[in-house]
Amino acid sequence: MTKYTFATHFIAAAILGSVSCLAAANCTKPAEATAAELQGGYRDVSELSQAFIDTTPERRGDGVTVGTLNTKSRKDMLVKLAKEIENNAHGHFDSLLIAHKGQLVFESYFSRGRINLPHYQASATKVYTGLALGRAIQLGYLSMADLDKPLVSFLKDLDHSKLTRGSDKITLNMALTMRSGIRLDDSQKEALDKISKQLKGQQHAQALLERSAPIGADSLTFKYQDDPMLVMHVIDAVVPGTAEAFIKKELLDKLDIKAYHWQTADNGLPEAGWRVNMTSRDMLKWGTLAQNKGVWQGEQLIPKEYIAKAVSPQLYTGDDDMFGGGKDVSKQGYGYYWWNAELKNGDRQFYSASAQGGGGQYIILIEELDLVAVVTASRRENNTLQLMAERVIPAFM
């Protein structure tokens, strides 16, 4: 997964496809990246001169089910929001997609956003790693009971005699909720960075667990760090073949995700917490998979009980420094790499779960309204969850 892979239908769609757009949206042609731009990537794409706003998204043969906004008021509300985004009234955005009742009904692109261009994900990648572990459980390589077993018990290449005290207290459940308890000071982190390319496979986990301060109740608390790589180590250890091949065969291929870039870490495993690129439509597939309780096109890819734990708050992190928040966003929690929050509109509260990436990538689930929203951006200057509460939720209430 170290290079871009593109299906020929993306280029064909750029030449032959037609999209029905609102005239009011100033949409003249699909927001497609050219073949040359696809080779260059996000930073090499020019800014759109006009936003692309579509209330009847096109079928593209990519596994995304499409529909249409079925009321004028709903259409007017969302187009108004998109036009404000185009005019930079809410910060910087590259795309906003909304699916309702399993159908993509609103698709818009701004700035460097393009329908067929994979957008970097940052920490939204963590959710993909967590779902890969869920896929391993569905296929029987792990069990739900294994989530509460010591993570090191799955890593057979470790020299346990050299691990820091308390390493056996780290469970998969703790690593999935950023509570591994691993604590390295700045000098230790710097020293590890210098030898990172030498630490292949489980040597990386060995190095972390040797150098960490002793692990106990005082450190087994929420800390946003590289715990997802520990989960990736477990995936690589328990599935047949490699974690890279497993993720491609059992998730990316199942979801018909062909245009992506998944970077390889220095240890030789797929990156677990960042450095993945996905198109906005493909991000929507991950959200739909979670919204449908692990089912994709009739097949149970991930256990229902695992999804329930993943998108539910396993702990509360408080409302300070809430990413994308605002006056109507509260009760911030954390599941298996999914953030949770209550979104208020009027006198009603709507529970949300969201994958979030630094710079502004989101996959947002609002189960009560059967909504999945996708946002991409390259700068943090937006309050996406507040916009969901204030502007998107009213359109579907």
Image: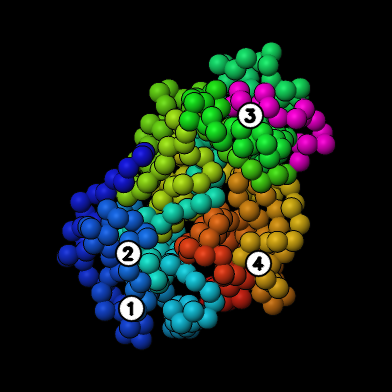
First of labels 1, 3 by sequence position: 1
Badges 1 and 4: C-beta atoms under 8 Å apart?
A: no
- For disc 4, the marked residue is 325
- For disc 1, the marked residue is 49
User: Among all residues in the image, which is located at the extreme right?
Assistant: 218
Q: Give the residues drawn in magenta, as a range.
A: 205-221
- For disc 2, the marked residue is 45
Dot 2 amino acid type:
Val
Badges 4 and 3: C-beta atoms under 8 Å apart?
A: no
First of labels 4, 3 by sequence position: 3
Q: Position of residue 169 (x, y in %)?
A: 74, 26
Q: CA distance from mark 4 to mark 3?
A: 33 Å
Badges 1 and 3: C-beta atoms under 8 Å apart?
A: no
Q: Is residue 132 above or below residue 330?
A: above
Q: Residues within 10 Å of mark 4 (few under 14, many from 20)?
A: many
Residue depicted at x 41% and y 33%:
244
- For disc 3, the marked residue is 208
Q: Nearer the viewer, mark 4 or mark 3?
A: 3
- Quarter of the figure with the C terminus: bottom right
Q: Is residue 8 left or right of residue 307?
A: left
Dot 4 amino acid type:
Gly
Residue depicted at x 18% and y 58%:
12
- Quarter occupied by residue 191: top right
Q: Nearer the viewer, mark 1 or mark 3?
A: 3
Dot 1 amino acid type:
Ser
Q: Nearer the viewer, mark 1 or mark 4?
A: 1
Q: Position of residue 19 (x, y in %)?
A: 26, 71
Dot 3 amino acid type:
Leu
Badges 2 and 3: C-beta atoms under 8 Å apart?
A: no
Q: CA distance from mark 1 to mark 3?
A: 48 Å
